[in-house]
Image (cartoon, rainbow, N blue to C red):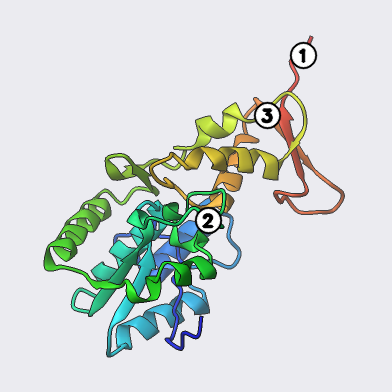
Amino acid sequence: MNCTDEIARLVDDFSMGPIDPGDAEQRARWEAEEMDAEAPIATSASVASFWEKVSSWPGIIVVWMSSRSGYELCGLHSLLWHLPRANIHIVDVSNVEFHPVAAPEYDEREAFAIVRHDRIVQHGLLDAATPITDIARAASHKEWQRLREENAPLRVLTNAGLVSASIDYFDSRIRERITDSWQSGGRIVGRTYETLSTGSGLEFHSLQFIFVRLLRLLDTDEFEGTTSGENPWSMQASQIRRRPMLS
């Protein structure tokens, strides 16, 4: 794209985990407990580098995102909360009228992360950044303050906006996709993930979180699972089904 601007990617997912106070150590403990993470993202070098770069950046910070993505919207709110006086411009692809020629099968407006480079150029998005208004900044602050006060395990995008949710919010959907026959963990996760695209947005993002919740369901008497050979539990190696009824 011949773009020479510096790029910083926020890989920490603020749609899950604590956000009050939301420091790296607190979020890393949550990842270890709820996501079985041996190397938490919150305390990774990439996350530390992101905050160091954007906090010291002297010019305009351009945020690429979609307000139809719960994951990306939470990232924007967190950025604005941490940098209340930064000069931030936004490219929000949620309302872009993408041309149908050479378009992918999925809805590109649901997340900037799924917009291809050629589509960015085709629609002139490199020149589409607009400064965030004081009204929008204040609204973001109010929204994130509410979510911080609730400080729930999850934040899910609904038709009413972002809402706080319990750790088992998606468990019923996962249960519905476990069958009497063996299926790979990845297949169950994929079929559950399909429900997260609501037509008006992408309510949640993390495949890994869905997989961990699937494994938690194996602690009940309702389901059973196995993993091949010496392989650790993974989406590819695991096989899961409903536990057969004893005759």
Which numbered disc covers residue 121?
none
Residue at the far right: name it. Answer: 229
The residue at which mark 1 appears reads as 246
Residue at the far front: name it. Answer: 101
Q: Residue at x 44, y 79 (%)?
A: 8
Inspect this view and state whether residue 215 appears. no
Q: Secondary structure at mark 1?
A: loop
Q: Amino acid at mark 3?
A: Phe
**Measured along the vertical axis of the image, is residue 167 above or below residue 173?**
below
The residue at which mark 2 appears reads as 101
**Measured along the vertical axis of the image, is residue 246 above or below residue 3?**
above
Q: Amino acid at mark 2?
A: Val
Inspect this view and state whether residue 115 appears. yes
Q: Quadrant of the C terminus?
A: top right
Q: Amino acid at mark 1?
A: Leu
Q: Quadrant of residue 156?
A: top left
First of labels 1, 2 by sequence position: 2
